[in-house]
Image: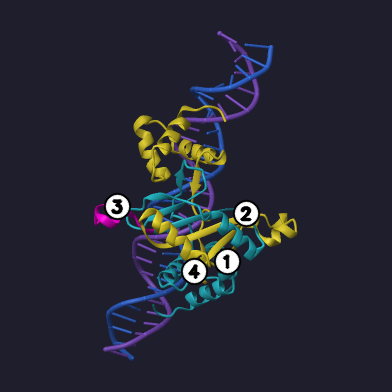
Chain colours: A cyan, B yellow, C purple, D blue
Amino acid sequence: MNYSRQREIILDILKSNVVHPTAEYIYSILKKENPKISLATLYRNLNQLAEHGIIKKIDGLEPSSHYDHNTHAHYHFICDNCKKVYDISSKIAPELVKRAETETNFKIIGHDIVFHGICKDCQTQNNIENRKK
Amino acid sequence: MNYSRQREIILDILKSNVVHPTAEYIYSILKKENPKISLATLYRNLNQLAEHGIIKKIDGLEPSSHYDHNTHAHYHFICDNCKKVYDISSKIAPELVKRAETETNFKIIGHDIVFHGICKDCQTQNNIENRKK
DNA sequence: CTCTAAGTTGATAATTATTCTCATTTTATA
DNA sequence: TATAAAATGAGAATAATTATCAACTTAGAG
């Protein structure tokens, strides 16, 4: 990764923000310092920084939502290979929420956990033909 | 909510699927039974079913990604009112992952937790002027 | 029953977030 | 300092989702 002034500014903005902003917000700050900067440059650099582990991209299960008829409290697992989404039961939930509430003093109404890794099918058969995306 | 044949079919498809599908996948099935059905109808009904708590929409923090310079293992809290995203530390993580692995036999590589509720600012000041979206 | 208001639909345009393309400029190094 | 690789800005393209609107359904009151 070569040096770039733009990337440095983007990283500075992220470092000075506690409430992990969206690309849109970062861009609004960015333009003050560098009105010519392109939105593509911002996205390119955010992705690049994330790939190099310098920042983290926070989102759920990529671009599109998934829909689940099971409305009981439970968690999800998405397979990195075949992209299928499985259920995981949630016995640990109440303890988790209590700890988070104590730590923050926020009122916690709900939470979602998404695990990812390799599902059983993809572990056993070297499930390349089902690779997605 | 009035009865609708389309909504019934959509719910049936969801109920017969263990690996919580995307709208796109549901639509592909849907068209076999009812080639005239509109994509808008699908999305309308998915949202409606979710609002009524009949199904669950699985995704992260709504439409746009957020970016975080803190790459240490930690969780997030998003305020339902002002939409700000805060960090929460993650002492419970190893136990959580171990339990999920035992339950599923999947290989778990990572996980994300997103809590939501009302942050401290929005609890104390009745923070209506900061309401977002 | 049957009339009517509210709910729902299909078709398609619009919107939002993000990625792609490509000619130009910048960076690192031989 | 020449040059290959990397990065940029501008704008077009894409993907997922929502909005619009006239026509059709549904449910309940009479």
Looking at numbered disc 3 in the image, what kind of residue is underneath it?
Asp
Q: Residues within 10 Å of mark 3 (few under 14, many from 20)?
A: some
Kindly identify which numbered label has been placed on residue B73: 4
Indicate which disc, 4 or 1, sits on the residue closer to the N terminus.
4
SS for callout 1: strand
Q: From what the image shows, is residue B80 above or below residue A33?
A: above
Callouts 2 and 1 in the same chain = yes
Residue A132 located within the stretch drawn in magenta: yes
Q: Which of labels 3 and 2 is toward the front? A: 3
Tell me the quarter of the picture where residue B51 sits.
top right
Q: Quadrant for the C terminus of chain A, please.
A: bottom left
What distance separates the C-alpha of mark 4 from that of mark 1?
10 Å
Indicate which disc, 2 or 4, sits on the residue closer to the N terminus.
4
Residue identified by numbered label 3: A121
Q: Position of residue A51 (x, y in %)?
A: 40, 69
Along the viewing direction, whichever of B112 and B106 lies nearer the viewer: B106
Along the viewing direction, whichever of A122 and A55 lies nearer the viewer: A122
Q: Residues within 10 Å of mark 1 (few under 14, many from 20)?
A: some
Q: Position of residue A26 (x, y in %)?
A: 55, 67
Residue identified by numbered label 1: B87
Along the viewing direction, whichever of C3 and A15 lies nearer the viewer: A15
Residue identified by numbered label 2: B80
